[in-house]
Amino acid sequence: MAFRTSLRSSLFASALSLGLGFGCGTEEARVISSCPPGSRDTGYGCAYDQRVAVNSVGYLPDRVKRATVPVQVDSFQVRDAAGGIVYEAAAIGPTMDQDEQTLWVLDFTEVRQPGEYYVSVQGPTPYLDSVHFEIGEDVYDSLLHILMLGMTGQRCGSAVGFTWNGTRYSHPACHLDDASLELVEGAPGTRDGTGGWHDAGDYGKYTVNGAFASGMMLLAWEHFPERLVGRAFDLPEAGDEVPDYLDENRVNLDWLLKMQNADGSVVHKLTALDFPGFVSPVGDYAERYFSDWSSAGTADFVAVMAQAARVYEPVDPEFAAVCLAAARRSFDFLKDHPEEHSPVVLPFKQMQYVTSDPDDRAWGACELWETTGDEDALVECEVGIAGQHPATSWDWSGLGSLAVYTYVLSRRSDRDRRDPELVLERASEITSVADTMALVANENPWGLASRGNRYWGINGVYARMVLGLRAAYMLEPKPEYLDAATQQIDHLLGRNYSSRSQVTGIGYAPPAHPHHRPSAADGIDLPWPGLLIGGAWPDPWSWTDVVDDAKTGENAINWNAALIYAVAGFVR
Ligand code: 9MR
Ligand code: ZN
């Protein structure tokens, strides 16, 4: 522990005087077989030299553009690719961040001309230039593309294969025996539970998180349809009648439909008894089981199926009808089972994504009302909303924000049936939460819209703050909301403590060793692309890019989906 404490306080000093980069932080040294170009094996992980921290993918011409530096800067220059100075200004600082680190912020919002640039700095301590980045209207296009490949790569039960940057990533159809009913029926037997997306770097499939991830992605479709409808994502389904974006989502929705029991309850998860080792998807021979149902999972199922019924209605009305019927059946089941039901854990070693259900029930009822206008769904929705508020930082265990957005931003022609006071109250909460986020992002030297603690999956939480900013923007189109939104994306693409991209396969020094079994088992040096890792917590130095660190270096569909939403609103 002493090592870690002293490491943290002396990190910048030693990095500067010895020319060392970051990457230490675990107690045990381990040898990395290969470090990506530009990095060195420190014995604790691959370390990169720290540079002026920028969004290493790029900035939109009309949005705020900032970089961050941990040493005193007197002046800085934005230079074109050839080194010519296009902009020069004084740094803003010193500023203290939430980790008591002293930082200088470089604002170059005024540079609007599309092109390739980098940032250099002058001050008492020399510091490395930023990497080159783009300014342009299309800077997020390849980011969205790779994030969608990230989802495709999570597919289970069908052969997966695509090429990115000249490397082929593939695996044959996996987990075709999904799954045994033995734990729920007490006797041998199976039911079809194939398909869907693997939840994360493990191969489990979970209803709460699966519905949540699809819910955010379908929300992106509803908020930014014109940016997604014609976009090709290199899917096996490319060229069919359905937009690729909806084809990818269909994979998970088809699987979710299989999680519904005949009585309308929905299975909580489908996994092996414990996490698999670092085996490939087809090398995972552990028996997998349906679990007991959960009320939270059932309610999330109602929500995403009701939402899917709206979204797919124009492109595939038959599928939309299947989704709606399924949503209604589970909604009726929940009305008959008003008490919370947590799934029975034994003999699973763990029961992931267990969560209290009032937020999930509210989300389910509000989505069903938005789709159908049913009076009983509206009643349940408003009872639920009375206890739910839009949040700044939130994740799978608190989905009340989704319920509130759908209720307040309703597009129903009969939306006047809502309780006008409740609508006004929640609408003003949405904008006041966003006002605070915009203020915090503007003052935070890393552009973060929250001063809160870091925890597991914090990168997904940062990405998800964009949902709240966008909901507010739909009520009041303040440019500050969009500037705060892109700054969250900047953070995940390199304007952060390590100055490294947090998404595999894109940006500067992206994660090389994510906790992602297919990447670890495929014998290819580069990890599967398009995966947002969970990120450093509790302290900002704790991500060391070593494969066995699930806490900071895993990917997960609810993190990728949040970033897909964030980026989808800004693509060309
Ligand atoms: O994202 C989840 C995080 O909020 C929890 O703190 C953590 C520990 O329970 O689990 C995370 O989710 C993991 C899930 O339980 C299993 N698949 C991998 C997920 C990402 O790490
Ligand atoms: Zn699988």
Image (cartoon, grey):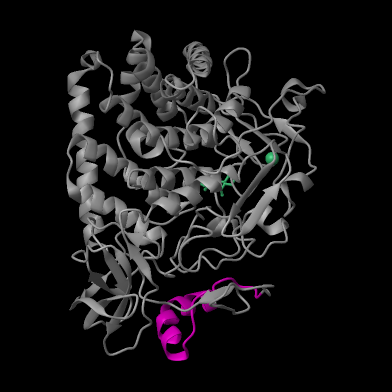
x and y percent of residue 267 in the render? Answer: 61, 25
Horizontal relation, residue 46 to residue 462: left or right: right
x and y percent of residue 432 in the render? Answer: 19, 42
Which image quadrant for residue 474? top left
Q: Is residue 3 magenta?
A: yes
In this view, which residue lies farthest toward the right?
A: 188
Horizontal relation, residue 296 to residue 94: left or right: right
User: As displayed, is residue 541 above or below residue 382?
Assistant: below
In this rendering, the count of numbered labels is 0
From where the camera sits, is residue 87 visible? yes
Residue plotted at (72% across, 55% down): 278
Residue plotted at (41% across, 61% down): 493
From where the camera sits, is residue 452 visible? no
User: As displayed, is residue 410 above or below residue 493?
Assistant: above
x and y percent of residue 384 in the render? Answer: 35, 23
Which image quadrant for residue 127? bottom left
Residue nearest the viewer, comparing 339 with 121: 121
Residue plotted at (58% across, 71% down): 26
x and y percent of residue 58 in the render? Answer: 35, 61
Residue nearest the viewer, comparing 243 with 513: 243
Q: Quadrant of the N terminus?
A: bottom right
User: As displayed, is residue 90 above or below residue 328?
Assistant: below
Give the residues drawn in magenta, as a range: 1-29
In this view, which residue lies farthest toward the front?
A: 239
Q: Is residue 112 magenta?
A: no
Which image quadrant for residue 236? top right
Residue plotted at (42% across, 27% down): 358
